[in-house]
Image (cartoon, grey):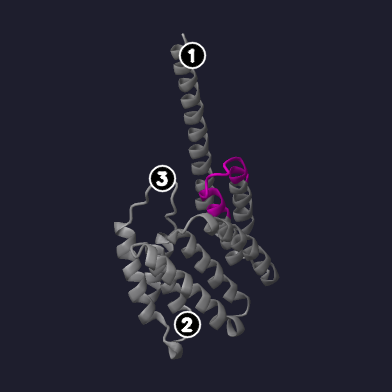
Amino acid sequence: MKKIILSLALVVIALASNAQSDAYNNGMKGMISRIESAQSNPEAYQDASNGFLRIAAAEKNEWLPNYYAAYCLAMQAMFSKDKEKIDPILNQADQLLSEISITIKSDEVMCLQAFSKATRISVDPMTRGMRYGSESAKFLEQAKSINAENPRIYFLQGESMFNTPEQFGGGKVNALQLFQTAAKKFAAFKPSSDLMPTWGQRTNEMMIAECKK
């Protein structure tokens, strides 16, 4: 009788675990689709970030909800027309990424940290370019040491090169090589799950076309 009760208890636990997993996966997929539809709307990215934070509050052992919340904040900052809002928004993103980095070392997190640093340059490129460009580059090198096949590394390096004046070693020609490397990496890239990051490929293709003009 005790064995039957124990077996039933294990079945109930397994079913509850599967239901929770399904709810998490479905919730995440729904929010990821909202990222894709946000396009260049800062408010839409803010709403999506809040949605991911709600999932993160319910799923404290999962790091991806906070990762995507930070990604949405970085995108919100990038498309913000008010430069005074960029740093406070990115401070929130950086805090989330720093908290993730306490428990895991992920090339994806480091790529997003690099993206956040690079986005800060837009506030004042003349005074911020060297500092935040260098910090962004360090994160990308760290990401490369973990997974050199991550296409977002080369995509972000390409964007940095594209936005660097030719007299300082940047420009379209040098950027194109990095974007083309990223394109090859994107073509071969296989995320470990349906929830893992895939961003950057579409923009990378646009940048290749821009560099060839």
Residue 76 in view in this figure: no
Measuring from the top left, give residue 59's x and y in whole percent: 57, 41
Callout 3: SS: loop
Residue carrying label 3: 194
Q: Give the magenta-colored segment's residue range.
A: 54-69
Q: Amino acid at mark 1?
A: Ile
Q: How many marks?
A: 3
- Residue pictured at 48% horizontal, 55% vertical: 104
- Residue pictured at 49% horizontal, 30% vertical: 17
Callout 1: SS: helix
Q: Nearer the viewer, residue 165 or 116?
A: 116
Toward the right, the furthest residue is 84
In the displayed structure image, the side of residue 5 where residue 151 appears, left or right:
left
Residue carrying label 1: 5
Q: CA gap, disc 2 to disc 1?
A: 68 Å
The reply to whether callout 2 and callout 3 are in contact (CB within 8 Å) is no
In the displayed structure image, the side of residue 69 where residue 162 appears, left or right:
left
Callout 2: SS: loop
Toward the bottom, the furthest residue is 167
Among the two numbered marks 1 and 3 on one chain, the one whose residue lies closer to the N terminus? 1
For residue 176: magenta? no
Residue carrying label 2: 164
Q: Amino acid at mark 2?
A: Thr
**Where 136 sits versus 40, above or below?**
below
**Where 163 sits versus 9, above or below?**
below
- Residue pictured at 59% horizontal, 46% vertical: 56
Measuring from the top left, give residue 191's x and y in whole percent: 37, 51
